[in-house]
């Protein structure tokens, strides 16, 4: 059970109000982590889209560069862009995984707080059951789609890198 230090320097259990405040604080941390997950997802999706546009432009101009002095380097544009795209996608995957681990940690902390106080647990569980549907554990979650998109971009960049390098 969570405890606090009192004036005498000894630990004492948290009272109900303190547990509610702690639950609110941990819930806010979880919500912030979830928000950051989707913010990073949006930012990196935009970066990947820009890289994809640059890649397609590099393919179109590789045969006839608009600036003649860049012609010797034109064949490396697509390799460089696909390498950066692959790096960004792998880094993106790693960041999202770390973010989901933090969010899971906050959820476990919330469960721990709820287990310690039956009144709070009953209130939160009852409130949740009355106002929202119970989660369907069999359905694919939104974060699953996010990982699918990340995997798709990673595979696309890897394929483009291989084709650019060997063809």
Image: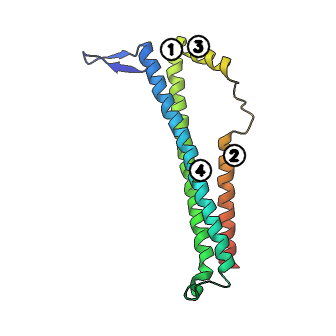
Name of the residue lying farthest toward the right = 138
Residue behind mark 2: 145
Cβ–Cβ under 8 Å for marks 1 and 2:
no
For the residues labelled 3 and 2, the Cα–Cα distance comes to: 33 Å
- Is residue 13 depicted above or below 158 in this figure? above
* Residue pictured at 58% horizontal, 44% vertical: 38
Residue behind mark 1: 117
The image position of residue 151, as x and y in percent, is 67, 55
Cβ–Cβ under 8 Å for marks 4 and 2:
no
* Residue pictured at 68% horizontal, 84% vertical: 63
Which mark is on residue 42? Answer: 4
Q: Of the residues tagged 1 and 4, which is closer to the observer?
A: 4
- Precedes in sequence: disc 1 or disc 2: 1
Left or right position of 91 against 22: right
* Residue pictured at 54% horizontal, 24% vertical: 111
In this rendered view, identify the residue nearer to me: 100 or 59: 59
């Amino acid at each position: 059970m969570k405890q606090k230090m009192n004036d005498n320097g000894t630990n004492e259990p948290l009272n109900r109000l303190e547990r509610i405040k702690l639950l609110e604080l941990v819930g806010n941390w979880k919500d912030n982590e979830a928000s950051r997950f989707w913010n990073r997802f949006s930012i990196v999706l935009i970066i990947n889209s820009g890289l994809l546009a640059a890649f397609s432009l590099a393919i179109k101009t590789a045969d006839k560069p608009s600036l003649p002095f860049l012609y010797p380097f034109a064949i490396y544009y697509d390799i460089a862009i696909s390498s950066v795209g692959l790096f960004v996608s792998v880094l993106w995957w790693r960041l999202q995984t770390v973010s989901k681990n933090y969010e899971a940690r906050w959820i476990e902390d919330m469960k721990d707080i709820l287990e310690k106080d039956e009144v709070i647990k009953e209130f939160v569980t009852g409130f949740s059951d009355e106002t929202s549907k119970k989660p369907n554990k069999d359905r694919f979650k939104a974060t699953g789609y996010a990982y699918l998109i990340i995997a798709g971009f990673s595979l696309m960049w890897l394929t483009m890198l291989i084709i650019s390098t060997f063809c």
